[in-house]
Structure formats: structure tokens, C-alpha cells
Amino acid sequence: MPGLHVGSSAMPTRIKRYYGHKHLHFITFSCYGRRPLLDIPAARNVFVKVLAVMRQRYGFRLVGYVVMPDHVHFLMSEPPKGNPSIVLKASKQRISAELRDDMYRGWSIPLPLARARAEKTLPRFWQPRFYDFNVYTQGKTREKLEYMHANPVNRGLVKHPREWIWSSYLFYETGQQGVIQIDPVE
């Protein structure tokens, strides 16, 4: 099979990304081993704060997002300089560094993270790769937004998407900007 190492566990050797077409990108990335390292509100708040900083620094449009306990989804444009891979790398590094710093400042550490650190079984905070799906139609944009916003309900975290504040849902429901500016597409 092309792109796979023979005898490997079907891990692609090279992921093909499609940049430079002015598409939106539906990005998904996970905490290491899908551990719920963003399980407490303080950790999700750090994530949202850093996402807002990265949005300003790189100038990409953020159409939607949701921060879950063990993974994250964005719907974003390509930045004027660079690409989503560069944005993701910088964001993941900054978020994990800030979360480590905050843990040392004394706020409670999510139990899975505390256990993993104590057992020295957490070599990293994030999975090294991410999923990137090009979105270039209004229908697919709507589908991805609905999928993201339904994620907390489907996982049993809340009964309605409006209850999960770590997403862009409230912007689409009320039109009011939240912690992070949302750039809806027409």
C-alpha cells in the first residue's frame, strides 16, 4: 500500500496535506494516548486563552472550535503566512508549556495527568500528528460546525451545546463574541 512502511502497523509515513487552495481546514488533534488531560475547566481555559493568542499572532480566521477533555477540533482558514501545520505546532507547544507552568503554580492537576506524571508514563502532552480535512463548501462547513458543537452532548458532558462554554456554539446561537473572536463564513 503506498505511503506505508512494510511490516508496520499501518501508520502512514507521509501524510498528504492540501494547502494553498484558500480552503477552510477541519483540524482534529488529541491529547497523548487520548488521555483526558484537558479534563478540568482550568486546563480548557488555558487552551482557549492560547488559541486566542495564536489566532492574533498568525492571523488565521477561526470559524469554529470545541475543546474536549481529550481532543480538540478547529475549523480555520490558512494563515496569511505559513500553514495550519505551523499554527498547530506552535499552539501545541505553547499550550503544553503553559499547562505545565500552571500546574507548578498550584492549581489542581487533572487526575489522569497527575497519575501519568507520577508514574512517568506521559512522554508528551499531545499526539504528534493531527487530522486535517479540507472544507470548501457551505454544506460541509455547516456539517463540521454541527459535528463540533454536538461533541460535548454526544460524549455525555452536557445536555445541550450551549452548556459547554469551550466551543463556538454560543456565537452561532446568540451572535455575541466570546473569549475568542469567531469569523463566520458567509
Image: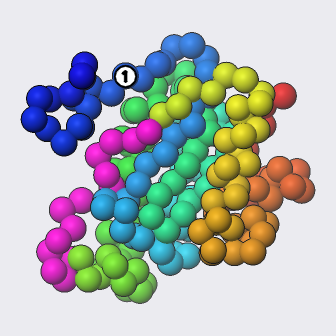
Q: Is residue 55 above or below residue 125?
A: above
Residue span colored magenta: 117-131
List the residue tagged with mark 1.
16
Residue 130 colored in magenta in the image = yes
Q: Work out whether residue 15 or residue 83 is closer to the camera in this orientation and state it.
A: 15
Q: Please, is residue 21 above or below residue 101 in the view?
A: above
**Residue 165 visible in the displayed image:** yes
Q: Residue at x 65, y 65 (%)?
A: 154
Tell me which corner region of the image, top left, top right, bottom left or bottom right, holds residue 36. Answer: bottom left
Residue 185's x, y, as percent?
A: 78, 31
Give how far across and how far down residue 142 sits, in percent: 76, 38
Tell me, yes or no, whether the highlighted magenta stretch contains residue 142: no
Horizontal and vertical percent position of residue 103: 35, 77
Residue at image x 30%, y 61%? 33
Seen in the picture, residue 152 relative to 15 is either above or below; the reply is below
- Corner quadrant of residue 141: top right
The one of 99 and 40 positioned closer to us in this rendering = 40
Task: Estimate the x, y position of residue 130 in percent, counting from the top left.
Answer: 40, 41
